[in-house]
Image (cartoon, coloured by chain):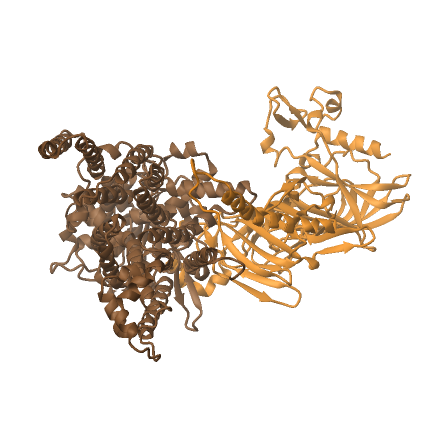
Amino acid sequence: MRSFCRLLAILVLTISLAYKTLATNVTFVPQHWRNTNMLRTIDLTSSIVRETTSVAAQNIHNESIGEYYFPIPEQWDNHLSYIEVRERKTKQTFEVEKVKINPLKWVPYSNQLSRQFDDMFVMQRNEKNEIICGSSKKFKLPLLHSNDTTSTCSRIRYYKIFFNRRLDPQEQIKFTITTAFTHMLIPYPKEITQTGRQQLLFQGNQYGNSAYQTDQQKTNVKLPSADIISYSQTKGNVIRNQKNLDYGRFNETKPNSYEELRIHYEFQQNMLTVTGLRRDLEISHWGGNLAVEEHFNLTHDGARLKGHFSRLDYHKTVYIHHETIMTRELTLSLPIHVSDVYYRDEIGNVSTSNLRYEQDKTIFDFKPRYPLFGGWNYTWYYGYNVPLGDFVRYHYESGRYILNIPFVNVFPQAIHDKVQVRIILPEGASDVKVETPFVIDKETHGVHKTYLDTIGRYLIVLEKSNVVNDHSKNIQISYTYSSLELLRKPLSVSLFLLGPFLLSMIYSRIEFSIGKSKRKTS
Amino acid sequence: MVLGLDAQNQAALLKVVILGLISFVAIASRLFSIIRFESVIHEFDPWFNYRATKYLVSTSFYDFWNWFDERSWYPLGRVVGGTVFPGLMVTSATIYNILHALNFPVDIRNICVLLAPAFSALTAISAYLFTAEIKDSSAGLLAAAFIGIAPGYISRSVAGSYDNEGIAIFLLMFTFYLWIKGLKEGSAFYGALTALFYFYMVAAWGGYVFIINLIPLHAFVLILMGRFSSRLYVAYSSFYVLGTLMSMQIPFVGFQATRTSEHMAAMGIFFLLQIIAFVELVRSHLASKQFQILFKSFIVLSFIIMFSALVLLTLGGYIAPWTGRFYSLWDTGYAKKYIPIIASVSEHQPTAWPSFFFDLEMLIFLFPAGIYLCFRELRDEHVFVILYGITSSYFAGVMVRLMLTLTPIVCVTAAVAVSHILDLYLDANSLETEESIDKSESSNKVKHSEKPGTKKVKEGGSRSSSNQPKIKGFDTRIIVLLNFFFFLVVFVWHCTWVTSNAYSSPSIVLASRNNDGTSFIIDDFREAYYWLRKNTDYNSRVMSWWDYGYQIAGMADRTTLVDNNTWNNTHIATVGKAMASSEEVAYQIMRRHDVNYVLVIFGGLLGYSGDDINKFLWMIRIAEGVYPDEVKEENYFTSRGEYRVDDEASPTMRNSIMYKLSYHNYNQLFNGQGIDRVRNARLPSETIQLSTLEEAYTTENWIVRIYKVKDLDNLGRDLEQATAFNLGKKTRRTKKKK
């Protein structure tokens, strides 16, 4: 059954339906479900677009099923950072898997399949191996290249949700799909003056993403402020209520329906993008210490600064600095027991930082060397020590140490394009296992050598792109570390210190001069 | 018996422990800036050394040798490999590579920052060795302690001051020690070692010329004193031949070692020694009368031949005459007249007399005493100390910077003097009265008193007193000792104070205090440089006065037009001319040099006096030297000959882009007339309009101001017209509204 579904799904993707023109067409996901109700919330209050879809689905198949397909158009899928599905009642999470497709297996245009569905969008590769697409009826000349897929040549990616049980025919299930998208919002206008107000443009779909027929659905858009410049009002079924826009209710919507949703609104917040983040965690059992160092490359991705920066205007507009599109100060929360915090960049220490101790955390406020306006970059790194006991536990039954630490410690509102977490285990750690609550792009194991190491330390590098706040969940790394290994360091240190003495002992006993020795032996 | 060691080993152990402590103190007292600020490279030149070291570490030695730096002196570039003393960079890179091979992942910046303090410990040890050769090891320990904390040396070797001098003073002292040792023992081995360290010195610092002139001078004086010996012959010949050959391996020196006047004295002495050695050989085979005639005629003839050869070769262009920098050593006014670029550097100014006391405190008073004591003994090495003392005190008087070469010898002679006094007054064995000490001191046998074996002689000299009935009472020697103890304490206190207050500021970071007494750091330079580094195109060209060239290259990582290397006077003058000219003229120059950004330092808001308006006169003077028709110094003064920036400033001054860039938008900050806190002047009330440049960034305290050079106008107007048009439209509109 599952393989059959997969086959069908692949079939669908091979023909690559463009949902825009396909609104009236059949889809190729097996129509085993019907959404009886769907409520969708688009949260635009931060620079990360968070979309929550609550679905009540009914099995209309004659067999019991355990999977559900959730479509995301490709141009959105590239921006997808986070997806999580939970059952409404039990709050249990369901496993989600992206349906893999192999683009090289796309059926050529001349294939029977594409003839079969005459009036639809097809894609194929031309002689130069470029993807071209167009209406299958009119398809004579290559129309568009793959880069232009956003508008006319969209494809859909499917996520397969595995329920934790099989649902009988006619049985209903209610679940919530939480997604987060990055880089979806475009500043419009692209440039603003130093004290100008920032406006963003959001483009999306009025209907919720669904591969199945939907009986009833509503879309609710949450905005950061009531200053909405314009919004789509195609069918007149929009209710505007202060910071909210309600679209719908829509009845009887077909699978993959599309109606443009375009909102132009004011957004007086900074849009920060961390283009690169490297997090180094170094464990020392001798020092009972976990050393953390994080390197940030930050870009202010909001509307760019028009012209140049004027210090005079900056001084004169102090009273509206809080609502100016610029980053003067950044805040991160660190673990409670931090010590030796430092904050530096490529050319040295930055003196503008401050630590505040709160009940269960430490707040680290720091200022970049210069205020960041739209389009400006800044890089820095900071580090601190925390007692090892706060993060590493010894598990007596298995005899293993377990490091339990958040994958990242990020700015809540920022987008993190690339994250690299490097975990350096003590010398002699072995049998290392890594567990993460989400999929990691790349995991590598290696060796790291530092001060007076003999065989080197165990190094784990985890890489993931497109990270948001939701990823700051704990990862677990377990390893064995025998207490005999603790002797390794003192031994190597004492050997190193003994070395010069041994050398000088040997040196003083060797006679270098030619001929008779003048030195008196006392 | 302590620790089961005999007296000799105890003394050795004590020496090692004391030297270890002195090294520790020498390093520790240089760390003020790290503790106050951070581990950062200081000032200007060290930034280039640091950048070159990073390049060397990231590439290979051959790449460094062939490094053509296209990111400085745009569009000329700079051949770094051939114009740099590589000793410093190679030293740090070697340390870096060794540490990394041993799995010590030390940052190259920290090695560079701590290199000078580490070498100061080595300097202290070599000062010990040197002085131990001059007098004895107790004087050596004193000398090591003095040089460890003497401000004159600390000024160039605090942590972060990553400059050639940091390692050069160690090399200087160690080379001299080896020379003395070689001369004493007549050893070719030590002569070769001297040459080896001389080579290291050549690789490290331009001041090697001092060695290559002082050692020949020493040899020459010894010959004149009739002290020619085979020891001198062996030591000097092995040193000169090997040293010269090795020094020619440094591309920056190359054939200068045989072709410039600075090196001629050494060569002349070398030939003279050969002649004398030959003459000595002949004398041992001839009768004295014949020999006298032969000798005289030979000497006169060879001198005439050598001198005329020198003159002819110089005239023929085979030997380069003295360079301007050396002329400025003889005539302090020379540089000001002919090479303003040298005179514009504050460290090339003649030394003011208080700075001798400031940098050396009581040592400067003990210095003549030490020299006097050397005269009393006058062995070969004492002649060397005297010559070193005399020459370096002359040079230190000519240039502030050369205070550095004076410091070691002052420390050595002062140590000789102090140790002499202590020897005399701390002798626990003799319980003599004050009178007898006076007697023994006047009996010219003092020099023997320091040797433990010759105590009998001294007792013999004061026999008269020992015959008298001994009265055990107040030992008056304690007065002198307490006095000297007090001096030494004050010396340490002074050194610490000077180090902490005068020499431990990185100068790229300024410290200030808040009203509540907490310290507050003004970091405008790095703010601007980091802004440039992160928010401008990597290939942008930044025009600034040459002082900031190395810093821009190092911290902002952008291409500069001129920098602290100052090898091309014309290029610097061109930048000076651009800064001193009106916008149209400057725009032409800037377009021709593909300038994207102009950086000026302005201290008016904060009262930072080292800013560009204060340096402006030097820019004008240097520009005038090359473009005398276009830039004239007197045009920048008021009719009464004053240098002003307020209402009375001359029109040329007010039209120069330096003036405009410094004060652009400044009046508006004060809602009217701006006040320049450096020059205590009230600015003209008119607003400054820029048409060819626009403000790109200004730091928090306005110290660094960066301007962007506008592109050509889209409509083909000149930029002044375009700006006027834009402004005109605006004013017309407002008029209409009214």
Q: Is residue B53 found left or right of A446 in the rendered image?
A: left
| Residue lying farthest to the front in this orientation | B467
Q: Is residue A370 visible?
A: no
- Above or below, A277 relative to B249: below
The picture quadrant where one finds residue B226 is top left
Q: Colour of chain A?
A: orange
* Viewer-side residue, B583 vs B120: B120
- Above or below, B286 relative to B688: above
* Viewer-side residue, B684 vs A149: B684
**Residue B21: where, in percent of width, then height?**
45, 59
Chain assigned brown: B
- Above or below, A268 relative to A458: below
The picture quadrant where one finds residue A89 is bottom right
Q: Is residue A208 found left or right of B611 in the rendered image?
A: right
**Residue B559: where, in percent of width, then height?**
37, 41
Quarter of the image for the C terminus of chain B: give it.
bottom left
The picture quadrant where one finds residue B409 is bottom left
Q: Residue at 71% x, 52% y: name it.
A: A403
**Residue A280: where, in percent of width, then height?**
61, 49
**Residue A297: where, in percent of width, then height?**
53, 48
Q: Is residue A35 visible?
A: yes
- Above or below, B596 relative to B259: below
Q: Residue at 91% x, 44% y: name it.
A: A168
Q: Is residue B428 found left or right of B236 in the rendered image?
A: right
Q: How many marks?
A: 0
